[in-house]
Amino acid sequence: MPENYRNNNIISTSAIDMLMKFGDVESAERFFRSIKAKGADIHGALMNGYNLNGESWKCFKIFEEMKEKNIIPDEIGWNILIGACSKSGMLHHCQYIVNQIPLNIQNKIRIQTGLIDMW
C-alpha cells in the first residue's frame, strides 16, 4: 500500500480490520508496525482483530504500548479490552483493566454491559 494511504486513519483501520477478518494476523501486525502515527482507533482495530482470531491475550500488550505513548482508548477501545478480558479468563488482567477505565466511561451502557458479560 502506498505510504500516503498508510497515514489515513480510516484506510489503515479498514486494512487492519480486513486482514484480521481473513485471519491474516501476521500481515495485520506488519501493516500496523508500518504506520507512523497511530491513534486509539488503529490500536483498537488491531485489538479487535486479536479478539476475532482467538489471540485476546495480545490485547493487553497493545494496551500497555498505548499507555507508554499516552494514547487513551475511547469507549470502543475500552469495550474491546473488556471483551479481551472476557475471552482470556485472566482475572488479574481483568481487574487491572477495570481499574484503568475512566469514571466518565464506566457509566456508558456499552461498557456496563461488557463488564457484566466479563464477570
Image (cartoon, rainbow, N blue to C red):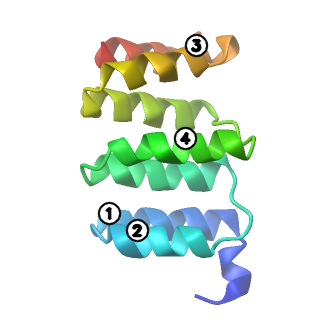
Q: Residues within 10 Å of mark 4 (few under 14, many from 20)?
A: many
Q: CA distance from mark 3 to mark 4?
A: 17 Å
Q: Which mark is residue 80?
A: none
Earlier-in-chain disc, 4 versus 1: 1
Furthest toward the bottom, the residue is 2
Earlier-in-chain disc, 3 versus 4: 4
Residue that badge 4 annotates = 63
Residue 58 vs residue 44, the one in the foreground: 58
Q: Position of residue 4 (x, y in %)?
A: 74, 83
Q: Position of residue 14 (x, y in %)?
A: 52, 65
CB within 8 Å, label 4 to label 1: no
Earlier-in-chain disc, 2 versus 4: 2
Residue 97 vs residue 44, the one in the foreground: 97
Q: Position of residue 16 (x, y in %)?
A: 48, 66
CB within 8 Å, label 1 to label 3: no
Residue kind at label 2, given as amino acid type: Met
Q: Can you see residue 114?
A: no
Q: Which mark is residue 106?
A: 3
Residue kind at label 4, given as amino acid type: Phe
Residue kind at label 3, given as amino acid type: Gln
Residue 105 vs residue 101, the one in the foreground: 101
CB within 8 Å, label 1 to label 2: yes
Look at 36% across and 32% down and name the residue there.
83
Q: Secondary structure at mark 2?
A: helix
Q: CA distance from mark 4 to mark 1?
A: 21 Å
Q: Secondary structure at mark 1?
A: helix
Look at 65% across and 71% down and name the residue there.
35
Q: CA distance from mark 1 to mark 2?
A: 5 Å
Residue that badge 2 annotates = 18
Q: Residues within 10 Å of mark 2 (few under 14, many from 20)?
A: some
- The quadrant holding residue 63 is top right
